[in-house]
Image (cartoon, rainbow, N blue to C red):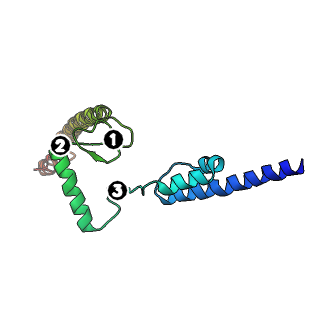
Amino acid sequence: MEYVIGYTIGLIISGLIFGFATKVVIKNKGYDDNWFWWGFFFGFIALIVACAKPQNVRYSYSPAHGTALAAAARESHEKKILAAGGWRCACGSVNAAYVSSCHCGRSKSDVATTQHKKELKAEKQDEHAKLADTQADRADELDKAAAIKEYKKLMDDGIISQDEFDSKKKQLLGL
């Protein structure tokens, strides 16, 4: 019975060692996969497979990385792709025309629909802003007309002179 307990503890310790070793090898190769359990259950074989996997090279087109020259080259490359019918995803990635879905999981049609909705929303906001501006202009004109009417009444009552009325009128009308 003691041998069984000792053997089980030895297997668990061996599994933990190979599990963590396999996980570290996979992480250092550039993969995000969790290979701990492969190493835990398959031990040395999983470690050999992990060591045999090729290096995962990731290219980052993030504008935060690289030099100004690299950024200019990246922008030039993106412009060429977009000029050839490519599309820009909501995540910022530029994809060629033949690519139907981005690496982030969004499809080309989803991005196009989202962009169309944003454009419609922007147009509606512009229309509302123009309408608000015209309403504000109308209200301002009505306020000016009411003020001129008040000054005219004051002039008719003899409280202000014709010169004062004319100067206030020019001031309100911006002449």
Whether residue 73 is situated above or below residue 38 in the rendered picture: below
Element type where label 3 sits in the image: loop
**Labels 1, 2: front one:** 1
CB atoms of marks 2 and 3 within 8 Å: no
In-image side of 7 versus 142 (left or right): right
Q: Is 55 situated above or below 102?
A: below
Left or right, 77 with respect to 170, comes to right
Residue 59 - label: 3
Picture quarter containing residue 157? top left
Closer to us: 113 or 40: 40
Q: Position of residue 19 (x, y in %)?
A: 63, 53
Kindly indicate whether the residue at mark 1 contacts the one at mark 3 (C-beta within 8 angstroms).
Answer: no
Which residue: 19% across, 44% down? 158
**Residue 155: mark:** 2
Q: Tell which circle, 1 or 2, labels the residue nearer the N-terminal end.
A: 1
Q: Residues within 10 Å of mark 1 (few under 14, many from 20)?
A: many
Q: Nearer the viewer, mark 2 or mark 3?
A: 3
Three-letter amino acid code at the position of disc 2: Met
Circle 3 packing at 10 Å, graded few (<14), some (14-19), many (20+), is few
Disc 1 designates what residue? Answer: 102
- Label 2 – label 3 distance at C-alpha: 78 Å
Q: Spatial distance from mark 1 to mark 2, Cα to Cα? A: 73 Å
Where is residue 175? Give x, y as percent: 10, 50
Amino acid carrying label 1: it is: Cys
